[in-house]
Image (cartoon, helix red, strand yellow):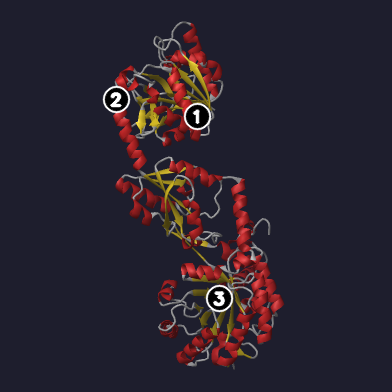
Amino acid sequence: MRALILNSGLGSRMGVLTSEHPKCMTELTHGETIISRQLEQIQEAGIRDVIITTGYNESVLRNYISSMNIDLNIRYVNNPDYRTTNYIYSIYLAREYLNDDLLFMHGDLVFENEVIDAVLEAPNSVMTVSSTRELPEKDFKAVIDKSGKIQKVGVKYFDEAMNAQPLYKLRHRDWEKWLSEIIRYCENGDRGCYAENALNDLDGACEIYACDVRNMLCSEIDTPEDLAVVTEKLHEIESRTVYIAFGTDILHSGHINLIRKARRLGRLIIGVLTDEAIMSYRRYPLVSYEDRKAMFENISGVWKVVEQNSISHRENITRYKPDIIVHGDDWKTGFQKPNRDETVSMLAEYGGRLVEYPYAKNDRYAELEARTRKDISMPDIRRGRLRRELAVKGFITAMEAHDGLTGLIVENTVIYNNGMPKQFDAMWVSSLCDSTAKGKPDIELVDMTSRFRTIEDITEVTTKPIIFDGDTGGRPEHFVYTVRTLERLGVSMVIIEDKTGLKKNSLFGTEVEQTQDSIESFSEKIRVGKRAQKTKEFMICARIESLILERGIDDALERSHAFVEAGADAIMMHSRKREPYEIFAFLERFRSSDTTTPIVLVPTTYNTIREEEFKTRGANIIIYANHLMRASVPAMQRVSRTILENRRSSECDEMLMPFREIIRLIPAEA
């Protein structure tokens, strides 16, 4: 594509302002003229070849443009008869250089960046019009049919017409037809009319459509009064604020292009989503909020970088009241649509507007995201995620997974409520479900080698942090190797319970004989485990069985403080009662003296309490310990019975998920 700028005229109506230079050199703001602004806009649009027609004070114009040191290939075409001809003849003289798609404008036209973006992004040949501005008496109007196609352009048209400005993007096939008619006019001696006269004679053969810029700046400057109006409008544009939010930690060309477009609309504010906001709806960020904020602060043209605490724009719209919010058009549908609706409604309250650009889709971007997911699934990154998420969010939820498929379910399950997402933060690999999946009793019969294999199955296809049920931890000398292996596998936390002897599931409580370890012995096991660690990220959690064994809250508190003193990174308090009162009592008393140690709860029996209340009372991790296993067994039994009863499988079809939907859960490279 090439650009054509028509600068042959005298500009006599500007009076003394154009006595020593062409009208296009009229100053708009300090240091910016009409022509300098046009050329910079053309350069930013990625166009390199520019044809400028000249006439009055040609040498002054050429010297001025040369002094700009702008990176464009500029060819000048002089119209020696500029006093007696119109710009149709200037186009004729430049005809041999116009054999391409064309961005065509008059040299006295001033338009804001959003206008040229809209023109260049249009799929067809277009001319700028305004459906909101009054029809001028002596300037161009465009007659437009119901399809949006321009039929006529001229001063005399009023019926079915809109205000029009001479800024065109012309596909070569359309421009070729128009240029041929311009050539015919000029060679027949008709050189004093508008070029649009030749266009009108084609009776719509050029398929040029209206590009409605409404109230955006797109005006010719013919008089000092026009200059005053345009200058004031430019001041408003330069003062307006533009807001765009980012949750990415890897900037690619699509993001840079969006930033480039946004900063051309005004003073650009970038809202950087916090780590917590990103984790609420997508993968864990590889780069911290502080580093991401610094990354955006160092991008040229960014006026301000601020924190955004949610995927909703509400808080920052209220705080900054931006004139424009920029977003990709991907949120018109899907889970973010409520956020879009909220944004549009809030902008309407004070006259702001939303500008949406096509969402950048590219195989390279998808490949970058896939590589990032692989990175965060690696042990060294996954291991520390639980500790970091606790530091950022303060409260996380974990769902049980006992194989690769259930791991994928936990990984990919997300729900949306008014545009706000909710998903699990971590996975719980329990000995109970691991044993049950293998058809074995939960008495530490399944050895650690087999249980580690379960972890490997899960880590191969997921990215979320893993909390591992370490039972009693075994003998201290064995626990050393368990810790090191779990670290190597990328597990974030191991939970060990303060019992000794052959394991018996806590669900049985005092119905079977269970022996609680001494405080001294279990504290030493914790210390041994902590000394064995190779990394700072790995966490050891002490699970206390005092309430299960009905030894009371005082015993639970004594053990909790002792185990924290021994080095435990977290405390898990267990209860099998259906009411949460003893758990609430423990939380209240523990938090009165320890406000920092994370508390883990497993509300399997006291399951009527919502997460928000646990959080309010001081809990940090909620584990749903066996729900996927418990859901799968009755479903499989029901299908099995149905097939036996009916001697065929048709009756159970409605109970089954199509296998193609199951396969969609599985990564292609898995």
Answer whether residue 651 is visible to the viewer in this image: no
The amino acid type found where label 3 is placed reads Ala
Quarter of the image containing the N terminus?
top right
| Position of residue 163 in the picture relative to residue 336 (left or right) | left
Q: Circle 2 is placed at which residue position?
A: 224
Which residue is more in the foreground, 123 or 28? 28
Answer whether residue 627 is visible to the viewer in this image: yes
Q: Circle 1 is placed at which residue position?
A: 124
Q: Position of residue 219 (x, y in %)?
A: 36, 28
Q: Quadrant of residue 307?
A: bottom left
Q: Circle 3 is placed at which residue position?
A: 625
Which residue is more in the foreground, 43 or 580? 43
The amino acid type found where label 2 is placed reads Pro
Q: Quadrant of residue 240?
A: top left
Instruction: Indicate which label's residue lies in the foreground, 1 or 2.
Output: 2
> Could you say whether the residue bearing mark 2 is in a helix, strand or loop?
helix
| Alpha carbon separation for disc pair 3 and 2 | 77 Å
Which residue is more in the foreground, 37 or 183? 37
Q: Determine contact: label 1, label 3, CB under 8 Å.
A: no
Residue furthest top in the image = 188
> Could you say whether the residue bearing mark 3 is in a helix, strand or loop?
loop
> Residue, x 48% and y 15% (percent of image)?
78
Q: Determine contact: label 1, label 2, CB under 8 Å.
A: no
Instruction: Indicate which label's residue lies in the foreground, 3 or 2.
Output: 2
Residue 141 marker: none
| Alpha carbon separation for disc pair 1 and 3 | 59 Å
Number of dots carrying numbers: 3
Say whether disc 1 or disc 2 marks the residue closer to the N-terminus: 1
Q: Quadrant of residue 370?
A: bottom right
Q: Position of residue 184 (x, y in %)?
A: 50, 9
| Position of residue 387 in the picture relative to residue 457 (left or right) | left
